[in-house]
Image (cartoon, helix red, strand yellow):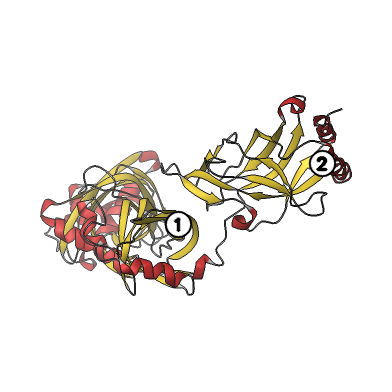
């Protein structure tokens, strides 16, 4: 089909005259033909008269609906009533213009968020890339502030509560969009004030119904409080990414309140979120004692409820107070496993100095077994402990102590990257006539197999995720559930016999 430029231009001018009359801002159909004519005229003539500005300013004109496929909200800025927002996927369905795709390549958005008829606040975004395919405009926007209106703070807390406790919640988005169109020979032309008003449904957190207990890292016992550090998986069923800061939950069983659980710097992305939970069990409460006793014989469900001090953020606190979630801890923490072993690839080297100081060199690779949380070694053998490796398997002297940990091991690793380190340990036992035959057999075994199977009796003290706490963890074979560890040895191991008197 061929277009006459003069005819199109004339049509645009006639449409412009028509839109000079007052327009009902809530009517889409009355404005549709005028908007179509304006954009056809723009594309073919580069002209955008004032009457077209009025035509696109209607609430329900060019933009018919908006889908927010992803949105991030950060509630950690200093001003609780000015959280930041961003989105990597917004799709607006536009008025169809037959045969024409609008050449929009960037937009800026001016959004007012309303809930239950109350305007909560506004977001002004910078210019961001956009594209149009068919009748759909796809865009995003970088970090931008949501300014909560001072008269709408209670309504905003109710909005947070609805998103936290409901499976879905409708929200009204209204305002305007500024768009830049690439018009080829006419250059790039900005069009300001394209109005919109639409209701879109946000999937909510729904009280986080699929929260699961993953792993118990450690417990620290005091007469008044038992400190329990756990990994839990909070499944976020929404499309929202939420940075909430420290969040506290009142923690109970069916027998009553047992204490407080805290998740530090909680950030929820859509889907699974492995987080550290710090539960302080108040041992002055009978329900806490009952919880520990019950856990030896049955699964126990913990109830996690928001309360009046769930967050130090006043904008969040009233909303989070409505949250009611739960998780089940299996009997005696049974069936819970690390995400991966904490160590691998052990090897031993006998040094020239071993003859005099009995120290051998150990090399091993360490990795976080705690579902992505970084770790660091504080003490491999804290005062008062006896941590050591023993010979195992079919080695001569199986069950005999082989080397001791003496606080020479230091490392730090992220949750995803392993680190290999070398440290010295003393060989255990005596080197005299009574033990020489066993050591000779051990050297011969090593020559044949190139390795020595060992097991650990090892309670290490580590840091987790730079949380400033000391965590006593069982890294022995019982605690990790690992079998024998293969300790690689080379030809130098034969020189261990030099420790015996000539």
- Tell me which label, 2 or 1, sits earlier in the chain: 1
Specify whether 403 is left or right of 216. right
For the residues bearing labels 2 and 1, Cβ distance under 8 angstroms: no
Q: Residues within 10 Å of mark 1 (few under 14, many from 20)?
A: some
Q: Quadrant of residue 327?
A: bottom left
Between tags 2 and 1, which lies in front?
2
The circle on residue 483 is: none
Mark 2 neighbour density, 10 Å: few (under 14) some (14–19) many (20 or more): few
Q: What residue is shown at x 46% (from left), y 64% (from top)? A: 213
Q: Is residue 166 above or below residue 495?
A: below
Residue named by callout 2: 435
Is residue 60 visible to us here?
no
Report helix, strand or loop for mark 2.
helix
Q: CA distance from mark 2 to mark 1?
A: 45 Å
Element type at mark 1? strand
Which residue is pictured at 64% across the width and 54% down the height?
A: 477
State whether residue 377 is above or below residue 60.
Answer: above
* Residue 157, horizontal then vertical, whole percent: 20, 59
Pointer 1 residue: 230
Q: Is residue 217 above or below residue 211?
A: above
Measuring from the top left, give residue 284's x and y in whole percent.
Answer: 30, 62
Q: Quadrant of the C terminus?
A: top right
**Residue at 78%, 46% in the rendered image:** 452
Instruction: Give the quarter of the figure containing the N terminus.
Output: bottom left
């Amino acid at each position: 089909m061929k277009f006459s430029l003069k005819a199109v231009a004339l049509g645009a001018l006639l449409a412009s005259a028509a839109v000079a009359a007052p327009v009902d801002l809530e009517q889409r159909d009355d404005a549709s033909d005028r908007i179509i004519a304006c954009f056809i005229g723009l594309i073919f003539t580069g002209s955008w008269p004032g009457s077209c500005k009025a035509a696109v300013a209607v609430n329900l004109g060019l933009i018919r609906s908006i889908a927010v496929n992803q949105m991030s909200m950060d509630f950690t800025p200093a001003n609780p009533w000015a959280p930041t927002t961003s989105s990597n996927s917004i799709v607006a369905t536009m008025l169809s213009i037959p045969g024409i795709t609008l050449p929009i390549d960037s937009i800026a958005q001016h959004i007012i968020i309303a809930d239950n008829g109350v305007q909560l606040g506004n977001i002004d975004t910078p210019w961001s890339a956009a594209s149009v395919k068919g009748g759909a405009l796809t865009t995003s926007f970088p970090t931008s502030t949501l300014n909560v209106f001072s008269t709408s703070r209670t309504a905003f807390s109710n909005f947070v509560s609805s998103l936290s406790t409901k499976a879905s919640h409708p929200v009204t988005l209204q305002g305007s969009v500024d768009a830049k169109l690439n018009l080829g020979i006419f250059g790039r032309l900005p069009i300001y004030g394209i109005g919109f008003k639409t209701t879109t449904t946000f999937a909510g957190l729904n009280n986080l119904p699929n929260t699961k207990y993953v792993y118990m890292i450690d417990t620290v016992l005091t007469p008044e409080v038992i400190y329990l550090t756990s990994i839990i998986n909070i499944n976020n069923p929404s499309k929202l990414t939420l940075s909430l800061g420290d969040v506290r939950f009142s923690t109970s069983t069916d027998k009553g309140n047992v204490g407080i659980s805290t998740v530090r710097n909680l950030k929820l992305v859509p889907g699974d979120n492995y987080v550290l939970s710090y539960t302080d069990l108040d041992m002055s409460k009978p329900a806490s004692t009952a919880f520990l006793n019950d856990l030896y014989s049955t699964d126990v469900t913990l109830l996690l409820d928001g309360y009046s001090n769930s967050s130090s953020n006043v904008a969040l606190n009233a909303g989070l107070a409505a949250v009611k979630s739960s998780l089940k801890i299996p009997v005696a923490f049974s069936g819970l496993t690390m995400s991966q072993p904490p160590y691998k690839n052990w090897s031993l080297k006998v040094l020239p100095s071993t003859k005099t100081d009995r120290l051998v060199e150990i090399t091993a690779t360490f990795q976080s077994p705690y579902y992505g949380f970084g770790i660091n070694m504080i003490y491999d053998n804290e005062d008062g402990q006896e941590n050591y490796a023993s010979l195992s398997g079919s080695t001569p002297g199986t069950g005999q102590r082989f080397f001791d940990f003496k606080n020479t091991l230091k490392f730090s690793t992220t949750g995803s990257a392993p680190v290999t380190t070398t440290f010295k340990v003393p060989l255990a036992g005596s080197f005299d006539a009574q033990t020489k035959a066993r050591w000779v057999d051990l050297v011969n075994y090593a020559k044949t197999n190139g390795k020595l199977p060992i097991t650990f009796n090892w309670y290490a003290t580590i840091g987790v995720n730079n949380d400033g706490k000391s965590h006593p963890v069982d890294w022995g074979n019982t605690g990790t559930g690992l079998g024998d560890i293969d300790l690689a040895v080379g030809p130098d191991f034969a020189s261990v016999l030099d420790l015996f008197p000539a």
